[in-house]
Image (cartoon, rainbow, N blue to C red):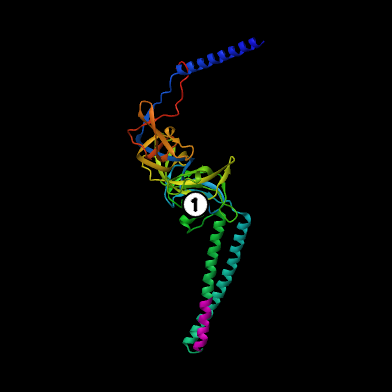
Amino acid sequence: MKKTGTIVILVGILVLFAGSMYWLWSKNSEDPIVYTTENASIGSIVKKTVATGSIVPKEEVLIKPNISGIIDEIFVEAGDIIKSGDLIAKVKVVPNVSSLTSAKNNINSIRTQVETARLAFENAKSIYNRQKGLFEKGVISANEFDNAQLSYDQAQQRYKQEQVSLTGARQNYDIVKTGTTSGLGASANTEIRATVSGMVLDVPVKTGNQVIESNNFNDGTTIATIADVDKMIFEGKVDESEVGKIKEELPLEITVGAIENMKFDAVLDYIAPKGVTENGAIQFEIKGTLKKLDTTTFIRAGLSANASIILAKADSVLTIKEGLVQYDPKTQKPFVEVETGDQEFERKDIELGVSDGIHVEVISGITKEDKVKVWNQIKAAPGF
């Protein structure tokens, strides 16, 4: 039994020895890892974040009527360039029966007052002429004549005031009935005119549509929307994770989906102080004013666009790929390995600058001639 146990142990030792030798042989037969190198290069790095939005006019003016009624005629259409004061549309008034009756009754009442004032004036005039003759003959005193003249002047003034009131009542009746009256000219309520110069972006009403005047209880019906299309802005939103990185006066690069191969410069001039929740994320509104456009490029209002907000930029600097940088496990300081001989490398600490996520600026530590080790190579699969 002892002899058998000894033999088993010796066989086991031989098997382990043979396995160890085979493992060492297989390891030695593997190809050694050969590290490649890359040189730093001179380039530009732009660190930016992207916001989505649209291009809209800086100011839009909504033209609303001063009187309720029905659109009788429209003189403009979307795309027209107009000036302040140009006629946009005419409104035909549908009179309110109650207001019309009240205005008519007011005319009748004032007519009675005018007739009463006329009779009083005629009577005062007759008394004045009689007293004047007596005064010239020396029959009455100057004081009595003065009283008669005063009564005559007062009656004449009252008669003229009543005539003016009657004219006003008639004009008011015409306005209630038709929306205009003689003497108003361009200020007639039925004529809707542009209050600013610019391009007509939209005419949301048609001939025959009923419109409501703007008042304290109603915004009124929009007849047309006018804007200066030479002053456009980018209006978009950024996520809460990015809003802390941006600030006003940063440059923007605007790309419009409908206009290929063109970028427009803008300046960020507004960041909303309060965010809103959209699809479970907090979004902050931003606005950027586009710089003056050339006359050959026309950006239509409402086009979707993306804005690249340039957070930092470095031109003509020494750069390497982010993948070449290693970090010390203790100090977390960056370093690279520089080739000193055939597959021999030396560690060099470096100072980094602006990064765009792919390339990073190297402020100090290496030169353009240094060959930097590509340390995180991917081994090729067998057979390749």
Residue 79: x and y, percent? Answer: 44, 42
Image quadrant assignment for residue 292: top left
Disc 1 crowd rating (10 Å Cα; few below 14, some 14-19, many 20+) is: many
Image quadrant assignment for residue 30: top left
Identify whether 90 is placed above or below 140. above
Kindly identify the amino acid type of the residue bearing the numbered disc 1: Glu
Q: Is residue 320 visible?
A: yes
Nearest the viewer among 88 and 78 is 78
Q: Is residue 148 magenta?
A: yes
> Over which residues does the magenta segment extend?
141-154
Q: Which residue is the site of mark 1?
A: 191
Residue 78: x and y, percent? Answer: 47, 42
Question: Predominant secondary structure in magenta?
Answer: helix
Q: How many marks?
A: 1
Nearest the viewer among 302 and 24 is 24
Q: Residue visible at 39% across and 42% down?
A: 313
